Amino acid sequence: MTKPDPIPARLAALKTTSTPDLKAQWRDLFETEPPPFNRRYLESRLAYRIQELAYGGLKPETIKRLEALGEQLDGGNITTRRIRADRDRPITGTRLLREWQGVEQIVTVMQGGFEWQGRPYQSLSAIARAITGTRWNGWVFFGLKNHRRAA
């Protein structure tokens, strides 16, 4: 009789594990400090790492193929990558509106960033954090990206 695989149970347990315990698992599995990202990110990376350690990671051929596809896409040029990311950015002068707790928040898209309440910001996420006091994906917070579709 074969022993049941404990990995699915371990993965399911991540959903109910406290954030401090997730961070402790991160330290054990990655041997680094956990990044300052949200709980969902920690869960997904831990789930991948648990499976990677139990079943093995990507084959070297797969890694080479992925790297080749990345090179083919942008030639390994970070400037090209940034230009592609800027394509989705609203045009300069666009005003983004979001009501938060009964208060209308207005952000203006600037040439090198964003402006909210007369102050410049590099990212929408920084503005969303200033408004809410918690970490948000700024594109999702301002309705520029459907979080479910992106996931």
Image: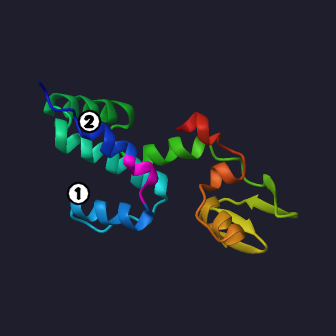
Q: Is residue 76 visible?
A: no
Q: In the picture, which quadrant includes the N terminus?
A: top left
110 relative position to 86: left or right: right
What residue do we see at 21% from left, 29% from top? Answer: 62
* Depicted 117 relative to depicted 18: above or below: below
In the figure, is residue 54 to the left or right of 78?
left
Residue at the top extreme of this rendering: 1
Q: Is residue 72 visible?
A: yes
At label 2, the amino acid type is Glu
Q: CA distance from mark 1 to mark 2?
A: 25 Å
Report the side of 59 relative to 91 (left or right): left
Amino acid type, label 1: Leu
Where does residue 83 sit, x and y in percent of width and height? 51, 45
What numbered label is drawn on residue 29? Answer: 1
The percent position of residue 14, horizontal first and vertical second, equals 39, 50
Query: Mainly helix, strand or loop, the magenta region?
Result: helix
Q: Which residues are magenta?
A: 13-17
Between marks 1 and 2 in the image, the one whose residue lies nearer the viewer: 1
Residue under the point 40% across and 68% down? 20
Q: Secondary structure at mark 2?
A: helix
In magenta stretch: residue 14: yes
Residue 126 versus residue 149: which sits nearer the camera?
149
* Position of residue 107 measured from the top left corner of the image (x, y, whole percent): 77, 61
- Taking depth in this image into account, of 9 and 115 the one nearest to the observer is 9
Q: Secondary structure at mark 1?
A: helix
Q: Is residue 30 left or right of residue 151?
A: left
- Above or below, comparing residue 146 to residue 133 in the picture: above
Q: Quadrant of residue 131?
A: bottom right
Question: In the image shown, does 50 or 63 lie closer to the viewer?
Answer: 50
Are there few (<14), some (14-19), or many (20+) residues within 10 Å of tag 2? few
Question: Label 2, on which residue?
Answer: 67
